[in-house]
Amino acid sequence: MKKIQERMSDKPRMSDHGFFGQFGGKYVAEILRRTIDETGVAFEKAMKDPKFLGDLAELQRDFIGRPTPMFHAKRTSKKLGGAQIYVKLEGLANTGAHKINNAIGQVLLAKYCGKTRIIAETGAGQHGVATAAASALLGMDCTVYMGEIDMKRQQPNVAAMELYGASVKAVTAGSRILKDAINEAMRDWAAHFDTTHYVIGSALGPDPFPDMVRTFQSFVGREVQSQLQERNVTPDVLIACVGGGSNAIGFFEPYINTKTPRLIAVEAGGIGPGEGNNAVRMAGDAHLDIIHGYKSKFLVNADGQVNETRSISAGLDYAGIGPQLCYLGGKGRIEFTSATDQESLKALQVFARNEGVLFALESAHAGAEALRLAPTMRPDQVIVINMSGRGDKDIFITSPIFRPKEWGDFLRGELERLDSNTEIHSSKIIISEEK
């Protein structure tokens, strides 16, 4: 980990004054410009500060659990009869996903800058959980904005955020998903920028966030590089799911400026083609626009309004994409494809039954592409998937699909127990009083 820290501190920036080609920038209200500029300066200073890097390395090791394992999916590889598939188990990081890497980095940076309050947006809830956990660890007040629809389908994560002491705010405006949560978080930040740091969860938003998020997530890709070298394995293909792009850009980071391996980003194909049925941007019909403080490609209608998107995975259900990913896609360095809800559910089952690994629905999109691609490759070739999160959080989505009767019986029983058990209600009162 120390060697990776030293290598990363040399180049925390890849953008050219906040731009990746024509994408990126800092399109924010004047009231936020000073605090965003200060954040950029603080970030670059911190990445050269031995004390900050030492504190970060300690938290990565002792709190996150880095390095996370990588394993050879031998049974799946054998059954497919093609390339050897390796899986980076980022879901084994504390809080269950890659999001904790960025959350710890940004909350620690905010503490170094003297901020006392953290805000965040979240879609699938993993970034919210990670930010709430990091804030609890470092003694920071935390508010998380989450679309009302996402809150309903990701209640386990809402419960976890609240257990960590965060205030979770339901966003009822617009489509009530991730893009609307970002809007509300931006409004909060503009009103409280002196005391508050906004922990953006993906590699997007105004400069310096794309560079900052990629840097804190790049430890995933650097570990993959080291772990493959230890095994004397050369990768032919790296595959990651992509919503905004935090796991993908961190996973790909060591290989961005090389010609190999192939880098494949998998978008949310939803229920199929058609406006509003998916969240396919780069492999679909996205348009250049400026939204949420940065220039990139977005799914917008003829009037310039953000289109509704659809995906079984809340973390991929976003109309835009990070500017560096957009730039690298345009250059051809990153290939973009998509997987439907059904393909992702199938991949989830395959890896669970063959390997004992439960992918998050987001990560299962990357798994679906690997299942398609591996049989077309030679047995001496290698695919590496980033399992960016584990699927515990998706039980309220997957159980009604895989075992509807049993799940319905369970929920009805739990409701009856909740209504009749006065001890549960009493314990809630005691807990709230102790808090």
Image (tube, rainbow, N blue to C red):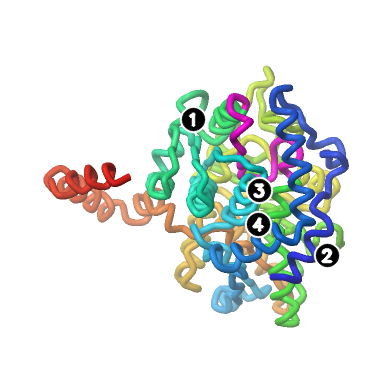
Q: Image point 50% across, 73% down: which residue? A: 355
Q: Quadrant of residue 58?
A: bottom right
Q: In which quadrant is the C terminus drawn?
A: top left
Label 1, label 3: how many angstroms apart (C-alpha)?
A: 33 Å
Magenta residues, dominant SS class: loop
Q: Amino acid at mark 2?
A: Thr
Q: Secondary structure at mark 3?
A: helix
Q: CA distance from mark 4 to mark 2?
A: 15 Å
Q: In terms of sequence position, does the residue under pointer 4 or pointer 1 come before the other?
A: 1
Q: Amino acid at mark 4?
A: Ala
Which mark sits nearer the N-terminus, 2 or 3? 3
Could you give the CA–CA distance between mark 4 and mark 1, rounded to whole angstroms?
Answer: 26 Å
Mark 1 or mark 3, earlier in chain: 3
- Which kind of residue does numbered mark 1 sit on? Arg
Mark 1 sits on what residue?
176
> Residue 151: image x %, image y %?
42, 39
- Secondary structure under the numbered disc 2 in the rendered image: loop
Q: Which residue is mark 2?
A: 260
Which span of residues is magenta-colored? Answer: 190-210
Name the residue at 72% across, 70% down. Answer: 2
Residue 285: x and y, percent?
71, 34
User: Which quadrant holds the N terminus?
Assistant: bottom right
Q: Which residue is mark 3?
A: 112
Question: Badge 3 local density, few (<14 within 10 Å), some, or many (20+)?
Answer: few
Q: Residue 240 has which mark?
A: 4
Q: Are marks 1 and 2 in contact (CB under 8 Å)?
A: no
